[in-house]
Amino acid sequence: MCQLIVNIRSEQELRQFGELLARSLPAATVVALRGTLGAGKTRLVQAVAAGLGVDPKVVTSPTFVLCQHYQGRLTIHHLDAYRLRDLDEFLELGADEYLDGPDITFIEWADRVSACLPEDYLDVMLEVVGPQARRLILNAHGPRNRETLDRLREAVER
């Protein structure tokens, strides 16, 4: 497993990081998002979406609708497992199609459906360290996402 830790001090830095992540993500990538309420999971998806040409204002938390879709340079599926009772309910959403599909799929509260995640995915843990400050801990699972994390590391270090 390959890891990258990024310290974010402001909303602007989160937006900048999200745009770097957008440039680093290839198609057919699953991004598992973890963190407490208010940690910035949806904000990160907004920033990545902006980097892919989607108006970030249309990106909202899918907590109550469970799944949202956005079309930019790549298609984004944005799922939320917070309110799901079990894995079967997650699969009934058609999540397996998104996990194996050609698009980018973000899953908020992914720890609740970890048994469904593919072998190759990017795990992002968001930790609150201050009013606007966050620590992002990214772990690459699988060879494709190790390459993704290597590209992202190079971009962050520039």
Image: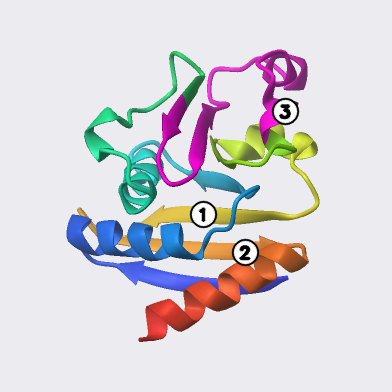
* Closer to us: 24 or 135: 24
Residue 84 magenta: yes
Q: How is the image coloured?
A: rainbow
Cβ–Cβ under 8 Å for marks 2 and 3: no
Q: What is the secondary structure assignment of the residue under circle 3?
A: helix
Separation of marks 2 and 1 at Cα, in angstroms: 8 Å
Q: Amino acid at mark 2?
A: Asn
**What residue sits right under mark 3 in the picture?**
97
Task: Tell me: residue 50, above or below residue 66.
Answer: below
Q: Amino acid at mark 3?
A: Glu
Separation of marks 3 and 1 at Cα, in angstroms: 24 Å
In the picture, which quadrant includes the N terminus?
A: bottom right
**What residue sits right under mark 1 in the picture?**
125
Residue 115 bears which disc, if any? none
Residue 53 screen position, x and y as percent: 32, 46
Q: Decide: few, some or many residues near mark 1? Use Cα within 10 Å; few <14, some 14-19, many ≥20.
A: many
Q: Is residue 12 left or right of residue 93?
A: left
Q: What is the secondary structure assignment of the residue under circle 2?
A: strand
What residue lies at 20% left-to-right and 55% top-to-bottom? Answer: 11
What residue lies at 49% left-to-right and 72% top-to-bottom? Answer: 152
**What residue sits right under mark 2 in the picture?**
139
Q: What is the secondary structure assignment of the residue under circle 1?
A: strand
Region of the chain picked out in magenta, as a range: 69-98
Residue 33 screen position, x and y as percent: 53, 45
Residue 124 magenta: no
Cβ–Cβ under 8 Å for marks 2 and 1: yes
* Closer to us: 8 or 106: 106
Quadrant location of residue 6? Answer: bottom left
Residue 48 screen position, x and y as percent: 38, 50
